[in-house]
Image (tube, rainbow, N blue to C red):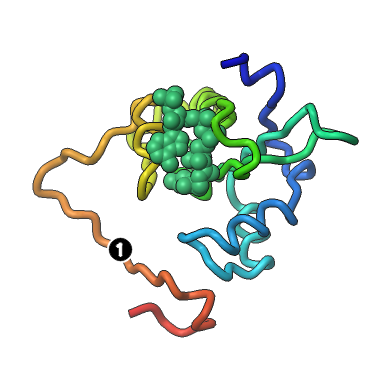
Amino acid sequence: MPDPTDRFFVSTDQAALEMDVIHGFLSTCYWSPGIPRTTLERAIRNSLCFGVFDRQASARPAQIGFGRVISDFATYAYLCDVFVLPTHRGLGASKLLMREILAHPDLQGLRRFALLTRDAHRLYEQFGFKPRTDGGKAVLEIHAPDVYRRGAERPC
Ligand SMILES: CC(C)(COP(=O)(O)OP(=O)(O)OC[C@H]1O[C@@H](n2cnc3c(N)ncnc32)[C@H](O)[C@@H]1OP(=O)(O)O)[C@@H](O)C(=O)NCCC(=O)NCCS
C-alpha cells in the first residue's frame, strides 16, 4: 500500500473542517442518525477535532475523514465520530488519523483513553486499544440513542 501521508494529511484546525461533509456523514450513520447541525457544531467547538484531507482532490484538499476527542487533556479522553468516506476507505487514511490523534501533545499521559466501536476493533487494536478487563467494574451510562428524533425529552 502506498504511504498514506503522500496523499492524506490530518489537521486540527477547526476553520478547515468541512461541516457539510461531517454533518452529511454523521447525520446518517448508525450511531448519531438525525443529529442536528447546530448540535454537531457545538460538539465540534468543544472538542479536539481531527480532519483528514485528500491532497489529490481537484481544487483544494478535500475532507474525507474525521475524528473527535472529548477530553480534560490531563487524565481522560474519549474518541468518537471516527469515519472515512466510503470513496476513500482501504487506503490507510484511518490509520494515519489514529497515529496523529495518539501523537497529539495534549493527549499524552492520560490514565484512560476510551472509545466504543461496533465492528472496527481491528483498526483500534493496532493502536493499543483493548476490550475492558478491569473485572467487577461495570460501565454505567444514560443512553438515549433516539435523542435527535425525540427532541429534548429526558432520556430513560
Ligand atoms: C472504520 C473506518 C474508519 C476505517 O477506515 P479506512 O481508512 O478504510 O481504514 P484503513 O484503510 O486505514 O485500514 C485500517 C485497518 O483497520 C481495518 N478495518 C477498517 N475498517 C474495519 C472494520 N469496519 N472492521 C474491522 N477492521 C476494519 C482494516 O482492515 C485495516 O487493517 P489492516 O491494516 O490490518 O489491513 C471506515 O471503514 C469507516 O469510516 N467506517 C464507517 C464508520 C465507522 O464504523 N467508524 C468507526 C466507528 S467506531
Count the labels in the image. 1
- Extreme residue toward the left, this view: 136
In percent of the image, x 58 and y 57: which residue is there?
26
Residue 78 location (% of width, % of height): 43, 45
9 above or below 16? Answer: above
Q: Say left or right for 68 vs 138.
A: right
Examine the rendered structure and indicate whether residue 43 appears above or below residue 109. below
Q: Residue at x 45, y 74 (%)?
A: 146
Position in image of residue 9 (x %, y %): 69, 26
Seen in the picture, residue 110 relative to 153 is either above or below; the reply is: above
- Which of the 4 quarters of the picture holds residue 115? top left
Dot 1: element: loop
| Residue name at image x 63 percent, y 53 percent | 44
Residue 23, by quadrant, is: bottom right
Q: Is residue 69 visible?
A: no
Using residue 55 as the reference point, say whether residue 48 is left or right of it. Answer: left
Residue 3 coordinates in the image, percent (x, y): 62, 15
Residue type pointed to by label 1: Glu
- Quarter assignment of residue 112: top left
- Name the quadrant of the C terminus: bottom left
From the viewer's side, name the closer residue of 116 and 7.
7
Query: What x and y, as percent, mark residue 22?
Result: 66, 52
Residue designated by label 1: 141
Q: Is residue 69 left or right of residue 62?
A: left
